[in-house]
Amino acid sequence: EAGVAQSPRYKIIEKRQSVAFWCNPISGHATLYWYQQILGQGPKLLIQFQNNGVVDDSQLPKDRFSAERLKGVDSTLKIQPAKLEDSAVYLCASSLERREFDEQFFGPGTRLTVL
Amino acid sequence: KQEVTQIPAALSVPEGENLVLNCSFTDSAIYNLQWFRQDPGKGLTSLLLIQSSQREQTSGRLNASLDKSSGRSTLYIAASQPGDSATYLCAATDTGRRALTFGSGTRLQVQP
């Protein structure tokens, strides 16, 4: 079974530029998550999708971050404009459905450096 | 709001030692608790998932326990090996939105 795929793996941009990340979850997984992991910290949830609907985006900085999930499968996360503090690893995860004992499976992440 | 704390932040042990990593959480109303391993530059690998109704889970040399009443979980690693060197993260799944709240991790170094 293929795992969660993410691209690109690395991205370096200058502040005020825009950037987009892509995630392809495990086939059949209805729930998709985007997490931000700043160096030395644990991942923090940015947004959660159930199929193509948003379940929770309370911690997403909506003035600069946006995300969508096309047809309930792939997802893109965009930052525009980027700030220095956005330097982090962006992790995508998916789970089968919103059941009590669901396990989340993580992709390798995209490491973003903002100069 | 759930908060997860991990102690210690870093740990260095000689090969062969048994060790315990600690995790505490503030809201005991969790659905489950997961332990993850993260290698440098890599994503997260799930090690153990403890359901809210369980007290512990075991996988090979790893044993994780859960005490919801005290808001604590421990990860026990037996006979540590250099290959165990990594950052270990615990995460609690809350009863509402089902997303994970992570601790900051324990960075483990096992010396050969």
Image: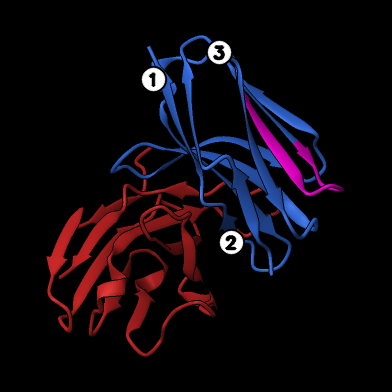
Chain colours: A red, B blue
Q: Is B74 one of the magenta-colored residues?
A: yes
Instruction: Give how far apart the Cα atoms at labels 1 and 3 are.
Output: 13 Å
Q: CA distance from mark 2 to mark 3?
A: 34 Å
Q: Where, quadrant-wise, is the N terminus of chain A in this rendering?
A: top left
Query: B89 or A93: which is nearer to us?
Result: B89
Which residue is under mark 1?
A: B83
Taking the spot 48% from the left edge, 63% from the top edge, the residue there is A44
- For image coordinates 55% across by 13% down, the residue present is B17
- Say whether disc 1 or disc 3 marks the residue closer to the N-terminus: 3
Above or below — where is B47 with respect to A79? above
Lower sequence index among marks 1 and 2:
1
Identified by mark 1, the residue type is Gly
Please tell me whether mark 3 sits on a helix, a strand or a loop.
Answer: loop
Q: Which secondary structure, mark 1? A: helix
Residue situated in front as seen by the camera: A102 or A83: A83
Question: Which span of residues is magenta-colored?
Answer: B66-76
Element at label 2: loop
Contact flag, marks 2 and 3 (Cβ < 8 Å): no
The amino acid sitting under disc 3 is Glu
Number of other residues with Cα within 10 Å of mark 3, as a class: few under 14, some 14 to 19, many 20 or more: few
The three-letter amino acid code for the residue at tag 2 is: Ala
Numbered badge on residue B99 = 2
The answer to whether residue A32 is seen in the rendering is: no
Q: Is residue A100 above or below residue B14?
A: below
Mark 2 or mark 3, earlier in chain: 3
Dot 2 and dot 3 within a common chain: yes
Residue linked to disc 3: B17
Q: Position of residue B19 (x, y in %)?
A: 60, 22
- Taking depth in this image into account, of B45 and A4 the one nearest to the observer is B45
